[in-house]
Image: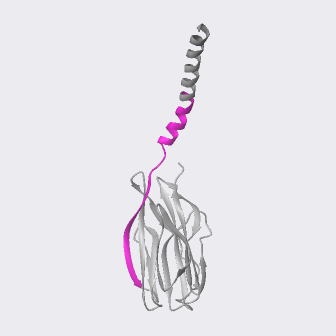
Amino acid sequence: MGMFRKAMPVATAVAALAIVAMAPVSAASASAVTISVQRAHVETVKEWRSNFTCPTNQVLTGRSHYGDENADTTYSCSFIFINGEQVRVSLLDWSTQMKEKDSFYEPTLGSVAIAGRMHTGDENGMTRYRPATLFWQGRQVQLINKTWSGIHKENNHSWTAGHNQVMTGRLHLGDENGKTQYQYSTVTFAG
């Protein structure tokens, strides 16, 4: 019985040391950031002659199109907030032109979102994209887990990025009856 009483304080001391050893981990997780992507702007343009860029400090998070090149395309843009503070979006140069009917766009740089798209004509017309980098408190925000959406029929679809995700690429094959897919990535920040 005397041995049990002596072992009890040692077990308690070991448990206390384990809690103290975990304290830095808890402190680190307390400094984790809160990210929020909030839709702020929706705009509809004619597909066959569009030159669209999201408003200041917003990036693309959705697109819908119903019909051929004479129909409308609707873009959704969102602000990104980290710990309640707005992320700054820095627009980059437009991509090179590509024929719409066989277009594949994914920025060659690392963490780059899409903030705009320009298109003229039908499926034989030219398309360009407006990439953008994201910054919070002077440091670049990262976009991870790049994933492609399912296949959408170009002339009958609406696509929206998921929770805390933004558009980072697009694929289109064929005319308005062809397929469209979107690449989306999750916004993250490791400070």
Q: Image height check: is 180 above or below 143?
A: below
Measured as percent of width and height from the top left, residue 91 is found at: 49, 69
Q: Is 29 covered by the magenta stretch?
A: yes
Q: How is the image coloured?
A: one colour
Measured as percent of width and height from the top left, residue 49 is found at: 45, 88
- Viewer-closest of 13 and 117: 13
Measured as percent of width and height from the top left, residue 4 is found at: 59, 13
Instruction: Determine whether, in the image, residue 190 is placed left or right of residue 70.
Output: right
Instruction: Determine whether, in the image, residue 141 is placed left or right of residue 41.
Output: right
Q: What span is in magenta?
A: 20-45
Q: Is 41 covered by the magenta stretch?
A: yes
- Viewer-closest of 63 and 133: 63
The residue sitting at 59% across, 65% down in the picture is 146
Question: In terms of image quadrants, where is residue 151?
Answer: bottom right
Q: Image height check: is 85 above or below 185?
A: above
State the residue lying farthest toward the top.
2
Measured as percent of width and height from the top left, residue 85 is found at: 40, 54
Q: Image height check: is 161 above or below 63?
A: above
- Viewer-closest of 10 and 159: 10
The residue sitting at 59% across, 9% down in the picture is 1
- Viewer-closest of 64 and 12: 12
Question: In terms of image quadrants, where is residue 19?
Answer: top right
The residue sitting at 61% across, 78% down in the picture is 104
Tally of numbered tags: 0
